[in-house]
């Protein structure tokens, strides 16, 4: 078994185990303060981790009760003047840090009987990172300092701006949420019908994630994928992860409601168990979808796409 396959199977097994518990979705990152919002991020680069790494780091954070998003390697914390705390006696050797995967594309030319053929594949490498609560030093103390409680209100303005900039008409009315590929339109129930604002924006980001697959955008959607087949389940997994990634970066809290995902859980597990590569593909596509939504320029005037009344 190659190292690449071992890495994929190990990460996939970890995520499958979390899903089998039925208690958490590892791409949804809970937080208790807006200051902690955002996906797990590198403390030096100040950039969110990508691919499967947000899932792995979120699970590690939830398992230890860590809300902060900041992680770094031993040398990165050292660069900031911090030191990793000694491994506690109750933690087994090799388990004090958390492994993340770095994916690097490689291109090469292979000689075949019909001539040269270009190949592109991914090389996976693992690194160990440590959470800000596993280190000590002034820089870590500053990151752990809590903000003034008076500034802790949730601002949904960034989510509204992403919805307006996405370029997808949103029609409010009825009692179901869906993306309609043929019309390239999203339908959502009226906002007051949702239990919380977080539920409304979480649903909107999920449907917008589907919309990124339209041929005019990322061209990801599989035509005529019917409910229950593998393509449909995979696309739902991509949209679920992408929507969660977008919400986390926008500071939209996780409502904690897993009821809408129950119908898909068994199909997601089947996809992941059947092919360890599928998790990496889903997370890659989800990252691309979230990036598309988060990096769209604001639309004004004639270019703005309004939300449509029922």
Image: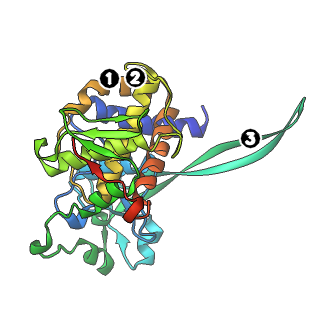
Q: Which of the 4 image quadrants contains residue 13?
A: top left
Task: Tell me, yes or no, if residue 91 can be seen here.
Answer: no
Secondary element under disc 3, as helix, strand or loop, is strand
Res. 266 mark: 1
Q: Quadrant of the C terminus?
A: top left
Residue 279 in the image, given as x and y percentages of width and height? 46, 36
Res. 119 mark: 3
Q: Quadrant of the N terminus?
A: top right
Between the C-alphas of marks 3 and 1, the distance is 34 Å
- Residue 77 in the image: above or below residue 206: below
The number of numbered badges drawn on the structure is: 3
Q: Which residue is mark 2?
A: 270
| Mark before the other along the chain sequence, 3 or 2 | 3
Could you tell me which residue is drawn at 69 percent across and 49 percent down? Answer: 106
Tell me the crowding category of disc 2: few under 14, some 14 to 19, or many 20 or more residues within 10 angstroms, Cα based.
few
Tell me the crowding category of disc 1: few under 14, some 14 to 19, or many 20 or more residues within 10 angstroms, Cα based.
few
The answer to whether 144 appears left or right of 106 in the picture is left
Could you tell me which residue is drawn at 28 percent across and 58 percent down? Answer: 159
Between the C-alphas of marks 3 and 2, the distance is 29 Å
């Amino acid at each position: 078994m190659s190292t690449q396959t071992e890495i994929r199977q190990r990460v996939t097994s970890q995520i499958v185990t979390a899903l089998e518990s039925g208690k958490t979705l590892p791409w949804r990152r809970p937080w208790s303060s807006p200051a902690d919002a955002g996906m797990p991020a590198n403390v030096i680069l100040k950039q969110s981790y990508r691919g499967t790494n947000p899932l792995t780091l979120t699970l590690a954070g939830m398992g230890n009760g860590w809300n902060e998003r900041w992680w770094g390697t031993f040398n990165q914390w050292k660069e900031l003047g911090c030191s990793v705390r000694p491994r506690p006696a109750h933690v087994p050797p090799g388990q004090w840090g958390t492994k993340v995967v770095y994916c690097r594309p490689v291109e090469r030319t292979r000689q075949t009987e019909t001539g040269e053929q270009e190949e592109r594949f991914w090389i996976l490498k693992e690194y160990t990172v440590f959470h800000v609560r596993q280190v000590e030093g002034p820089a870590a103390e500053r990151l752990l300092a809590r903000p003034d409680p008076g500034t802790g209100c949730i601002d949904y303005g960034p989510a509204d701006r992403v919805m307006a900039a996405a370029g997808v008409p949103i029609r409010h009315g009825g009692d179901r949420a869906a993306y309609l590929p043929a019309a390239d339109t999203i339908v959502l129930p009226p906002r007051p019908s949702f239990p919380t604002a977080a539920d409304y924006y979480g649903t909107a980001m999920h449907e917008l994630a589907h919309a990124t697959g339209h041929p005019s955008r990322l061209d990801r959607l599989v035509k005529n994928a019917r409910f229950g087949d593998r393509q449909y389940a995979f696309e739902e997994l991509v949209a679920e992860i992408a929507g969660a990634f977008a919400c986390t970066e926008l500071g939209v809290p996780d409502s904690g409601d897993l009821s809408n995902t129950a119908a898909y859980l068994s199909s997601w597990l089947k996809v992941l168990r059947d092919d360890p590569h599928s998790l990496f593909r889903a997370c890659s596509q989800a990252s691309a979808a979230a990036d598309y939504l988060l990096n769209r320029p604001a639309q004004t005037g004639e270019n703005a796409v309004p939300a449509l009344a029922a």
